Image: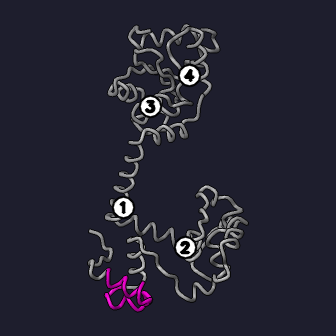
Amino acid sequence: MSDRKEFTPAQLSEILHLYQDERISLTKIAPLFGTHKHTLACYLRRSGIAVRHSGQQLARVARLDAAKLRELYETPFTVIKIASMYGVKRATIASLMKQYNIPPRTLSATHLGALNHWYGKHQPANVCAAVSARNKRNWEDPAYANKMRAAIGASSRSNWADPIWARKMLLALHRSPTKPEVLVDAAIKRLGLPFMYNGNTGDLVVERRIPDFRPTDETKTVIEVFGDPFHDLSLGFVTDVKRTESATVAHYKEHGYHCVVLWSKPIRAHSKAGDIDAWVGEQIAAQAGGLH
């Protein structure tokens, strides 16, 4: 249940009368309705009602007209920096910008050093230590930890359900092509097999996975090139069973695809031996059940 303060239509009408018609401040109105002025201000803003700034705040920015504010903002200063220059709150400057139709910068722009007064700076060591200790205490609480894990899991599932987000994320995580993938790609082209490299385009995404090679025909056979450190559990570099050959083949099979797995060591060995084309063709024919 929401803990926001709500008012009846009659109360809202009375608040608006006192605030807009009688010009009484929120500081004086709030106690009449058993709330705080900031709570009342937030409620009015949510209801689409403009909130006046205090006389002291307005007096400090009285000489800050649209031209001056635009000049400062395009210098460029951040809203926080401008507010500190005039001794007012950030919300006061943000409200003036909206009033003067000055568009805010994008988030990416504010990350640049010239636009961000925190760029290259760090919190004091004691502050970092205090924040770290607080976070550790929070995560030691099972209720807090379970709540956070559930929230993070829900957010992650929601993101991965978006095919555009999933494709961008997988491409960002997928550095390609590797040397073995280049060798296989060249062999496939020389043999004229119906496959196309997919690792750097993500044209085909099969439930969070981008196969290294996708089919260009209707056979629904994909090819994965495996490096030993990333997929061989016996080496001890990776512990995720989902990365193994059997789990990968099962994953694609579950979604209607046949998966051919080619390991990097034999790829390199046959490349040096000069029979990479014959070996790739044999492996695809054998693992794909004679489809190719």
Residue type, label 1: Ala
Question: What secondary structure is the stretch in magenta mostly built from?
Answer: helix
**CA–CA distance between discs 1 and 4?**
42 Å
Judged from the image, the secondary structure of the residue bearing numbered disc 4 is helix
**Residue located 64% across and 14% down the image:** 272
Please state which amino acid type lies under the numbered disc 4: Lys
Label 4 sits on residue? 265
* Mark 2 crowdedness (10 Å alpha carbons): few <14, some 14-19, many ≥20: some
Among numbered discs 2 and 1, the one appearing first in the sequence: 2
Distance from the alpha carbon under mark 3 to that under mark 1: 32 Å
| Residue 241 in the image, given as x and y percentages of width and height | 39, 35
Residue type (three-letter) at the residue carrying disc 3: Val
Q: Which residue is mark 2?
A: 95
- Residue that carries the numbered disc 1 in the rendered image: 145
The secondary element bearing badge 3 is classed as loop
Q: Nearer the viewer, mark 3 or mark 1?
A: 3
Q: Which residue is mark 3?
A: 205
